[in-house]
Each structure stands twice: as structure tokens, then as C-alpha cells.
Image: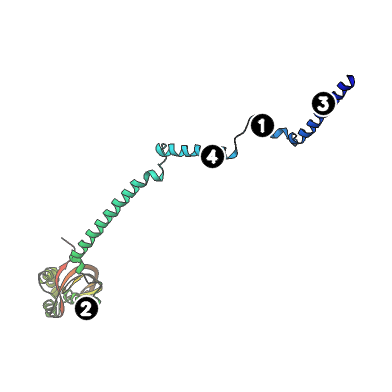
């Protein structure tokens, strides 16, 4: 009996050892660093990243819905208002441009060819420069020459204006033996419309007394003249001294 029991026990031990050897390779893992093992399970990296993205999306939605004080709303919120404002501005500009173009086409000033008709501009400047020098010069010894210049170069109300302006010179000339000389230094055509023109005149004047004590005075003058073209000749029709 003891032999039989001993044999049975031995067989059991051998079976247990064999079973342990068969299980050991499958269950024993490589040594693990204790520092890499967390006390609690961790989320996968992908899940954590997605959670952060959802958090940012919710934050963006809140900011779009309720703008912060002092911070302008996002572009998607302001875009319709900006488009409406741009449409109104473009419409207003188109209306203004159309109105301005129509006004310019109807404006009589558009007939001014002083800067485009070079030949006619040069013609009126030359003839009026000569006319001014002639009618505003006076020699006490040759009063008839001044009268001839008036008839040749003046017309309309310019005749009376010229007479009023030189009345004192004519009265004092014989006594003081006056010689008045006017020289145009510069002129500009302000308006040229067909046979009508307006010019700005700059001139130097010298008034000489040729009596016992000869004396000469000098003065500069600026005035405007209206001119008309008749029979191929430009004549002064009005004189503007810019005084009331």
C-alpha cells in the first residue's frame, strides 16, 4: 500500500511539474519598467486629441454667437453688412459719375477752346497785345494818333470805359507835356469761344513829363479785357479793372 501510494504521489508531482513547465512560456512576459505603468488606465492619444478639437470647436461657436466687448465679430458675421455697404457705395458713385458727365456736357464752359485751338489763341493774344499798347498810350504832341487807335481797336462799351479812364491824362497832357506809354509784359487767354474771348493783361506803364523839369514815373497794371472778332480782326469790347 505504501509503495502504491508513493507511486501515485510521485506521478502527481511529475504531472504538476510538467503542467507548470508547459504554462510558464506562455504566461511569463518580459520585465516591465515600473515607471511606465500608470496607476489608472490612460486614454488613447487619438481620443485625447479629438477631445481637444471638440473643445476648440465649442469655443469658436460661442465666440461667433456672442462677440466679446471691444472685439469685432468674425468675418462670417460681418460679411453681409460689408457687401451691402459696398453695393450702396458703388451705386452712389455710379449715380454721381453719370450726373457729373451730363453736367460737363451741358456746361457752356466746355466750349472753351483756349487750350485746344492753339492757332486762334495765338492770334487773339497777338492782336489784343497790340491793341492794349496802342489805346493805353498817349502823346500830348499827337492826340490824333490816340483817337485813331480808339476807333481801330475798341468797340461797344469799351469806348466809353477807355474815355473815362484817360480823361485826366487828356486834360493834363497839354499843360504838363505828358507822354504815357503802356507795354504789355504778359497776357493769357482765359476763355476762347468762337469769335469771343477774355484775356488777362499784365502791363508796365511809364508817365513822362517833358517840361522844364523832366520826370518819369512807373507803374504796373493788371486788368482783363473782353474781345470780339469782326472781319478777321480782334477788338476790345469791354475793360475790367477789378474795381467797383
Asked if 184 appears above or below 54 in the picture, the reply is below
Comes first in the chain, label 4 or label 3:
3
Instruction: Quarter of the image for the N terminus: give it.
Output: top right
Label 1 vs label 3, nearer the camera: 3
- Seen from the viewer's position, the closer of residues 52 and 73 is 52
- Seen from the viewer's position, the closer of residues 129 and 180 is 129
Comes first in the chain, label 4 or label 2:
4
Comes first in the chain, label 3 or label 2:
3
**Label 2: element kind:** helix
**Label 3: element kind:** helix
Instruction: From the image, tell me which residue sits under label 3.
Output: 12
Q: Residues within 10 Å of mark 3 (few under 14, many from 20)?
A: few
Left or right of residue 151, residue 70 in this image: right
The Cα–Cα distance between marks 4 and 1, rounded to whole angstroms, is 22 Å
Left or right of residue 35, residue 159 in this image: left
**Label 1: element kind:** loop
Q: Residues within 10 Å of mark 4 (few under 14, many from 20)?
A: few
Q: Residues within 10 Å of mark 1 (few under 14, many from 20)?
A: few
Instruction: From the image, tell me which residue sits under label 1.
Output: 38
Report the residue at 29% width, 54% height from top. 90
Amino acid at each position: 500500500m505504501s509503495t502504491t501510494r508513493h507511486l501515485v504521489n510521485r506521478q502527481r508531482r511529475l504531472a504538476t511539474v510538467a503542467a507548470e513547465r508547459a504554462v510558464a512560456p506562455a504566461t511569463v512576459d518580459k520585465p516591465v519598467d515600473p515607471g511606465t505603468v500608470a496607476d489608472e488606465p490612460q486614454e488613447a492619444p487619438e481620443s485625447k486629441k479629438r477631445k481637444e478639437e471638440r473643445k476648440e470647436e465649442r469655443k469658436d461657436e460661442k465666440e461667433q454667437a456672442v462677440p466679446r466687448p471691444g472685439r469685432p465679430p468674425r468675418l462670417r458675421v460681418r460679411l453681409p453688412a460689408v457687401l451691402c455697404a459696398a453695393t450702396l457705395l458703388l451705386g452712389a458713385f455710379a449715380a454721381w459719375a453719370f450726373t457729373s458727365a451730363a453736367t460737363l456736357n451741358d456746361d457752356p464752359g466746355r466750349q472753351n477752346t483756349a487750350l485746344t485751338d492753339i492757332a486762334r489763341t495765338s492770334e487773339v493774344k497777338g492782336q489784343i497785345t497790340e491793341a492794349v499798347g496802342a489805346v493805353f498810350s498817349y502823346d500830348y504832341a499827337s492826340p490824333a494818333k490816340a483817337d485813331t487807335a480808339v476807333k481801330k481797336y475798341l468797340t461797344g462799351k469799351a469806348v466809353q470805359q477807355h474815355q473815362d479812364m484817360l480823361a485826366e491824362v487828356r486834360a493834363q497832357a497839354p499843360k504838363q507835356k505828358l507822354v504815357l506809354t503802356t507795354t504789355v509784359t504778359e497776357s493769357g487767354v482765359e476763355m476762347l469761344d468762337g469769335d469771343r474771348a477774355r484775356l488777362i493783361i499784365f502791363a508796365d506803364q511809364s508817365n513822362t513829363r517833358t517840361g522844364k523839369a523832366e520826370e518819369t514815373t512807373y507803374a504796373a497794371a493788371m486788368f482783363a479785357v473782353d474781345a470780339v472778332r469782326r472781319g478777321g480782326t480782334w477788338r476790345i469790347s469791354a475793360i475790367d479793372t477789378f474795381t467797383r
